[in-house]
Amino acid sequence: MSVTVAKGFHAAGVAAGIKDSGGLDLALVVNRGPRRAAAGVFTANRVKAAPVHWSEQVLKGGTVAAVVLNSGGANACTGPLGFQDTHATAERVGEVLEVSAAEVAVASTGLIGVRLPMDKLLPGVTTAADALSEHGGEKAAIAIKTTDTVHKTAVAGRDGWSVGGMAKGAGMLAPGLATMLAVLTTDADVDSAALDRALRAATRTTFDRVDSDGCMSTNDTVLLLGSGASGVVPGPDEFAEAVREVCADLALQLVKDAEGASKDIRVEVVGAATEDDAVEVARSIARNNLLKCAVHGEDPNWGRVLSAIGTTSAVFDPDRLNVAINDVLVCEDGAAGADRSLVDMRYREVRITADLRAGEQAATVWTNDLTADYVHENSAYSS
Amino acid sequence: MSVTVAKGFHAAGVAAGIKDSGGLDLALVVNRGPRRAAAGVFTANRVKAAPVHWSEQVLKGGTVAAVVLNSGGANACTGPLGFQDTHATAERVGEVLEVSAAEVAVASTGLIGVRLPMDKLLPGVTTAADALSEHGGEKAAIAIKTTDTVHKTAVAGRDGWSVGGMAKGAGMLAPGLATMLAVLTTDADVDSAALDRALRAATRTTFDRVDSDGCMSTNDTVLLLGSGASGVVPGPDEFAEAVREVCADLALQLVKDAEGASKDIRVEVVGAATEDDAVEVARSIARNNLLKCAVHGEDPNWGRVLSAIGTTSAVFDPDRLNVAINDVLVCEDGAAGADRSLVDMRYREVRITADLRAGEQAATVWTNDLTADYVHENSAYSS
């Protein structure tokens, strides 16, 4: 399934030898048309990887014939030579597929600050082109994994057309775009402008609201490619909903596979004066290390929720704040409410609901607990 | 030593029974004059503990006769009844010392959201008053400990006068005031306005630049009391420097005793266009969980430093950033510089220097590594 569920797309995932492990590490996704419409959103980090700089330019043209993605190296902070590597990769894809390099998007993921082994990557492009097939989506999804324990794919099927997608991401998951690579494809017959509208609306409330560890990547890339191969022109709302469905599905898969996590925490802020207030408060809660440790210990420590809310500039009265954990109202009017021993936190999903009681707006941010395994995974080796 | 090194101050630390452990948990610091000048700075968290609300009012009068501090409970998020408890505590101190309750500052530390056991605390005030002595500074410093493994005191001795201080803090150490309780005393003959100027200047570049875990407390309080008992009127610069010396000493002791930490990280940002830029960048680096894990693993992962810098709004060119770790220039012009294997990270102190190459301003923020022990300490029980 994955990116090849939509008609008009071929994909492949191969082992180019970029990863020391010898696993799949190079993915190619090709749009066979008839349309080659595309849209993309990229990291808000000002330190951007070479492939992000390249792909931002490609997307300005609104046409993408192919995307080449590699794991095993982020090609970030690699200077002008790193940019040349990205350029050479796009050129090689252009040659083997007989398309313009200016219509080839590139995405990379892995360690920052290290050049890619081009002697392995470029031959890998040829191997991947040879392996392209309409069943290649699964292998492509596997080839972009880094510390991911599982590959992530999602599909929204509709009447005669569909949206499919793949994503990777397990650490450096944070806002400004949640931190990962994702490629979505559709055979709906829509132009690049419509793809762009649907993608931006979807990422704003899905990938952008995943904040596993507060760390923003240099390589975030989400692409949506349209082949038009179904010949079906969906209504804009219907199309936007299908794109959102796939983005939301993939974003939640990222949370569930976050490095070292033992809990998925749904932070819902309601009663906010504005959506911006709701997002600011939700993010502040989601980023509080002490709270994340408490959730790991299955301790409904609502004091740490209030302490996090208090650092924001949102509209609220400290003496009217309500907080529920797994639907038990443990904090009422800014002070102790129901007995905290009533909160059952044994399950993987934990819901924290903060009511600012200052308006009607709401937002949900997903995060994870902070665990010794997260520390181990991010201290035992470079990633 | 501690708060009783300055003439005119008596202190005590007793076990009132607030802590289940039976350890010292109530401290009293009394200014015997002739002056009773005072200044205070408090948490920037909008969710403030009852004693913070109380003490802010007391400090507006510019006169503090005594400070009562308890560990074993923060008295934060305890509603109107929690405020009544603080008021009753000040009243009891006023009664036993024959001073006005309006001149008694109160500080509390411990778990948020739980009422204090007033049946134990109020008799404890009487016990503490009976134990007051000019040698009581040490016991007072011990009585304010929570998860601290050691008590923290500092002294700046000058010609005929001195500044002494004590502090507690090991978690929820973050900006907006670094998160702790601290009481400083001086027998210099200065008024409250001069105390206030010296204290604000000192905390801005000491306690405010400690950011152990990014979590801002509800109870931060730093008080400076002046007895004038030395009869010496120091010059304003000399006095400010002595206050800064004690604050810096105590702030660094907080970092060195941070929960679960195995490394103290000095994040120095130089070449910034403004001091605000330097602080913003230093704080962003200091709060990056992935970097803090890398330091724990003794991995000079400069890519994570650049990734953190990239999330700020400071003035810089990503392709001109330089980063040194323990004085090895591992990143030059935004890309790999010296061989990272040259960096020796075996020692407890790690220095990260980021040069934005955009101006002449600098700032230093202290933080710690992120360890499995931090997770354990903050997930195994409520704190």
Image: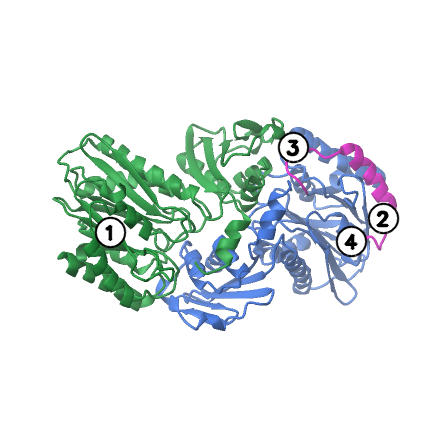
Chain colours: A blue, B green
Q: Position of residue A177 (x, y in %)?
A: 59, 50
In the image, what residue type sits under mark 1? Ala
Residue bearing mark 4 = A227
Q: Quadrant of the C terminus of chain B?
A: bottom left
Tell me the distance, in whole angstroms, between the alpha carbons under discs 1 and 3: 59 Å
Q: Quadrant of the N terminus of chain B?
A: top left
Which of the two residues, B171 or A29, is positioned nearer the viewer here?
B171
Give residue B122's quadrant in the image. bottom left
Residue B164, disc: none
User: Is circle 2 on the same chain as circle 3?
Assistant: yes
Whether residue B23 is visible, yes or no, is: yes
Tell me the distance, in whole angstroms, between the alpha carbons under discs 1 and 2: 78 Å
In the image, what residue type sits under mark 4? Ser
Residue at 65%, 32% (x, y): give it: A78
Residue bearing mark 1 = B12
Tell me the distance, in whole angstroms, between the alpha carbons under discs 3 and 4: 34 Å
Instruction: Tell me which segment is drawn in magenta.
Output: A110-136
In the image, what residue type sits under mark 3? Thr
Give residue A351's quadrant in the image. bottom right
Crowding near the residue tagged with mark 2, few <14, some 14–19, many ≥20 C-alpha atoms within 10 Å: many
Tell me the distance, in whole angstroms, between the alpha carbons under discs 4 and 2: 16 Å
Residue A78, disc: 3
Question: Is residue A113 left or right of B192 when viewed as pictured?
Answer: right
Tell me the distance, in whole angstroms, between the alpha carbons under discs 4 and 1: 78 Å
Q: Which sits earlier in the primary sequence, circle 2 or circle 3? A: 3
Question: Is residue B357 left or right of A199 when viewed as pictured?
Answer: left
User: Is circle 1 on the same chain as circle 3?
Assistant: no
Please report contact status of discs 4 and 2: CB closer than 8 Å, yes or no.
no
